[in-house]
Amino acid sequence: MASGLAAELKRKTVAADAAVAAVKSGDWIDYGFGVGQPDLIDQALAARVATLRDVKLRGTLALRARAAVEADPEGRHLTYLSWYFSGLERKLHDRNLCHHIPMNFGEAPGYYRRFIDVDVAMIKTAPMDEHGFFNFGGAVTYHKALTEKARVVIVETDPAMPYVFGVENGVHLSGVDYVVEAGGGGLPELRNPPAGPLEQKIAQLIAAEIEDRACLQIGIGAMPNAVCELLADSPVKDLGVHTEMFVDSLVTLYEAGKVTGAHKALDRFQMAYCFAAGSAKMYDFLNRNAACVAGPVDYTNLPHRIMRNDRVVAICNAAQIDLTGQACAESAGVRQISGTGGQLQFMRGAYASQGGKAFLCLSSTYERNGRRASRIVARIADSNIVTTPRTDVMYVVTEFGIVNLKGKSVPERARALIGLAHPEFRDELERTAREYHLLGPAHF
């Protein structure tokens, strides 16, 4: 490391409490994304939150409890807002301590550059490299745009953060105001629940549709990851990866020799992604691995980029779908449970890809208060949020089958989706569909 860089790093390195002294009442603070959210700085902000007022704190997919939010349990000093809820943020929302900001994930860098004010950015990075850059590691997402826009930039360095290759994946020391060194306590890990028999059945239906040379996008959850596990033991070969989220099952697929990327148009021979959340093994896999390339979310998620690869396969989840095909993937009534994320953009990008396929998967039923209810409904609940419009839904998959809605009329869609519902609910769905004039004559 050049002596000038070393001297500047020493001058800018401070304790966490000194760094958060930059925060003033009325500020917009941004914690960034996922594994890139700070811990020591968060604790230091928590220690002084009672001295502040009207502070707005923005983040996404928090994977550890946010000390600053918990230090203000009545929300008198700080308001927390999230672009996409993790399980932790969902619980904060239930306590009225977290509020949602709607977005298409791939547009996030543009939001920051065009519309959003940031007073203080506080993010976790890898330690500074020999060229003076703090690598964003498993949270490239929109962090470059965030650090460009912020009035004050504070980085918390952690040797556990993987050093990733790619574009717009770091901030130079000259653009950083304060550096806080973390103790290397490890990154938060995200574990998907194991796939049960129902998820395995849905995964089998999807895996059967994936051909050699397909380019995969794998979303969060047990079902999409079960698809990768099946593909690892299948005859399929020469797969590519262009995804939003890098997950453990992609490591399994790569180590099984199924991923070469040889037929991709973008980032040939490399797996492209914008963030990672999973196990310590997966973070180690990404560290300085030339088989992987990380870019900002407008690099991975905008449809006009996704479609440049042939045979794109997007696998996403839904919570509810109605008989016309419109799908909710982010709310349970008025309760926000996640966010739009990249679903709509990957649905569109996969469809526009030559030979592409977009899958929306869901179990046919769910249990609530000891009662079974159908996820396929005649009309989406009035309080539910439509994540993917009916015009963008392609393949729908439940444990009872798979259907492609593209080109189908409303009566054809209704009939096909009733066939994917649990048998217990099919008669009721057909009766209601006729009441709503969703079905044509009996012979149609």
Image (tube, rainbow, N blue to C red):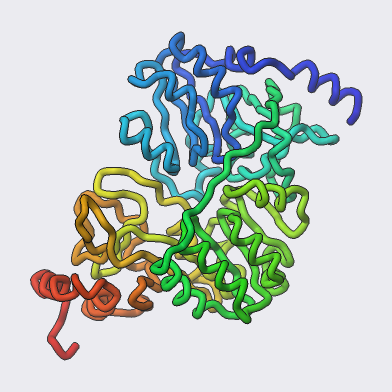
Quarter in which the C terminus is drawn: bottom left
Seen from the viewer's position, the closer of residues 241 and 104 is: 241
Of the pair 8 and 116, the residue shown nearer to us: 8
Residue at 33%, 62% (x, y): give it: 389
* Residue at image coords 36%, 21%: 73
Left or right, 349 with reference to 365: right
Q: Is residue 12 left or right of residue 241?
A: right
Residue extending furthest left?
A: 435
346 lies left or right of 418: right
For residue 136, which quarter of the picture? top right
Indicate whether 99 appears above or below 137. Answer: above
- Looking at the picture, how far across and down is residue 341, in whole percent? 45, 51
The residue furthest bottom is 443
Q: Position of residue 233 (x, y in %)?
A: 61, 75
Q: Identify whether 263 is placed above or below 105.
A: below
Q: Quadrant of the N terminus?
A: top right
Q: Is residue 204 above or below residue 392?
A: below
Q: Does 225 sit above or below residue 27?
A: below
Query: Where residue 343 sits in the image (x, y, percent)?
Result: 45, 58
Residue 114 is situated, as x and y percent measured from the top left of the image, at 51, 38
Q: Residue at x 38, y 72 (%)?
A: 397
Where residue 306 sits, quadrant-wise, is bottom right
Q: How many marks?
A: 0
- Give the quadrant of residue 401: bottom left
Q: Is residue 205 left or right of residue 321?
A: right
x 25%, y 44%: residue: 334
> Closest to the observer: 263 or 427?
427
Instruction: Name the outermost residue toward the right.
Output: 3
